[in-house]
Image (spheres, rainbow, N blue to C red):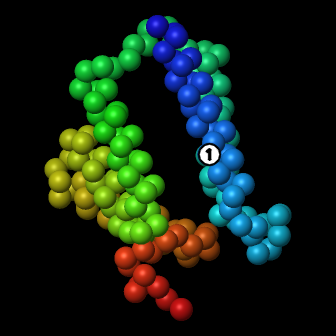
Amino acid sequence: MTFNDRIFGVLMIALAVAYGWGTTLFPEPFGGAESVGPETFPRLLTVVLALSSLYLIVRPDPDNAWPWSRTGVELIIAVVVLVFYTMLLQPLGFILSTLLAVGTLCWRMGATPVKAYLTGAVAGIVVFLIFNFALDLSLPLGLLSFLEVS
């Protein structure tokens, strides 16, 4: 069953290449090419994804089998949630879309809906504050744009 890991690794390499290419579409940072800009974190993710994918191709798990039971369905649901997360990021904003995505994923993993969506809200707010104030990288506010401080 090592073939499954290799297929997944090749698909993830293709995703890493597409994701890395997408980072080249970000505008040039104000301080020039040497400064940290909005493309820095996605490029780091691209490198991690590519290296992890190469590892799967070179050293696959010998006992791997695709989970076609409930686990497989949950994986498909997670992918759908993440696709909707990217689609809703701009219109709803980072905090609300993160609340929905993290909350839904936590709920699917067994948390009660209240705890799951509370976790999503805390995650969205904390990460937003870290990016906006500690890293000085703006994230979209979307529907919450009335909170924007001038």
- Three-letter code, disc 1: Tyr
**Is any part of residue 48 visible from this angle?**
no
Q: Residue at x 37, y 76 (%)?
A: 143
Q: Is residue 70 left or right of residue 85?
A: left
Coordinates of residue 106 in the picture (x, y in percent): 28, 47
Asked whether, in this view, residue 15 is left or right of residue 71, the answer is right
Q: Nearer the viewer, residue 3 or 131?
A: 3
Question: Residue at the bottom extreme?
Answer: 150
Q: Tell me: 55 left or right of 27.
A: left
Does dot 1 land on a helix, a strand or a loop?
helix
Query: Residue sitting at 71 percent across and 67 percent down?
Result: 27
Residue 134 vertical position relative to residue 85 in the rendered view, above or below: below
According to the picture, the residue beneath numbered tag 1 turns out to be 19
Q: As rendered, which of 20 and 124 lies closer to the eye?
A: 20
Q: Quadrant of residue 26?
A: bottom right
Residue 33 screen position, x and y as percent: 82, 64
Q: Is residue 63 above or below residue 76?
A: above
Percent x, y for residue 125? 40, 69
